[in-house]
Image (cartoon, grey):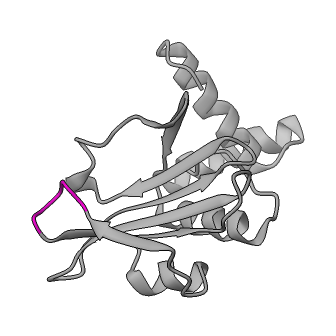
Amino acid sequence: MITLKQFMEIISYRISEGSKWNGFSPDAYSLDYWNGDHDGHSLCIIFNTKDQTVYSVQACDYKNNRAYRFSHPEHCKDLDKEAWDDVSWCDLETENDWLEKAQAIVDGRDYDSRVQVPLELEDSELFTLMQLAHERDITLNQMIEQVLREMIEREGLTV
């Protein structure tokens, strides 16, 4: 899980507020950073003050109306779906995805708004995908993304 240190480094140790957090545990607390701009960004970390367990980290990009969240798997079932005014949380699958997006948001850089999905493939499956990508003259990443999109659509879900 993301650590307090990683969070603090992203925000350059600038805390704008903190408060006891109702939920997760009686010892839950949130530290927040807001850059002071309504078209800017804010980040939040919710953690346990006793054992330092991080329950959730959040990054809000108000300029682009995007809200990203990465939560400890054991503690994400009761979280709100809406971040603010018709903007839903995008729950990320990997710590690295949140760290990359959060740092880019704080730095004011463009970033990939797609969600990184952890994927484990057998060597034979990977080889087959590489061959298909080569035949289509696309990258392996593009091939995997295409396959995942087709599978999602086949299941009747939205991307």
User: Does 107 sit left or right of 136 as displayed?
Assistant: left
Residue occupying the point 65% across, 59% down: 41
- Relative to 146, say whether 94 is above or below: below
User: Does 144 sit left or right of 8 as displayed?
Assistant: right
- Relative to 8, say whether 18 is above or below: above
Kindly tell me whether residue 71 is visible in this rendering: yes
The magenta stretch is 21-26
Residue occupying the point 34% across, 38% down: 80
Residue occupying the point 53% across, 64% down: 43
Q: Observer-nearest residue: 36 or 11?
A: 36
**Quadrant occupied by the C terminus:** top right
Q: Position of residue 40 (x, y in %)?
A: 71, 57
Q: Main secondary structure of the magenta part?
A: loop
Would you say residue 117 sits in the magenta stretch? no
**Quadrant occupied by the N terminus:** bottom left
Residue occupying the point 84% across, 37% down: 135
Q: Position of residue 99 (x, y in %)?
A: 57, 69
Q: Observer-nearest residue: 137 or 155?
A: 155
Q: Position of residue 51 (x, y in %)?
A: 16, 82
Q: Observer-nearest residue: 44 or 103?
A: 44
Kindly tell me whether residue 120 is visible in this rendering: no
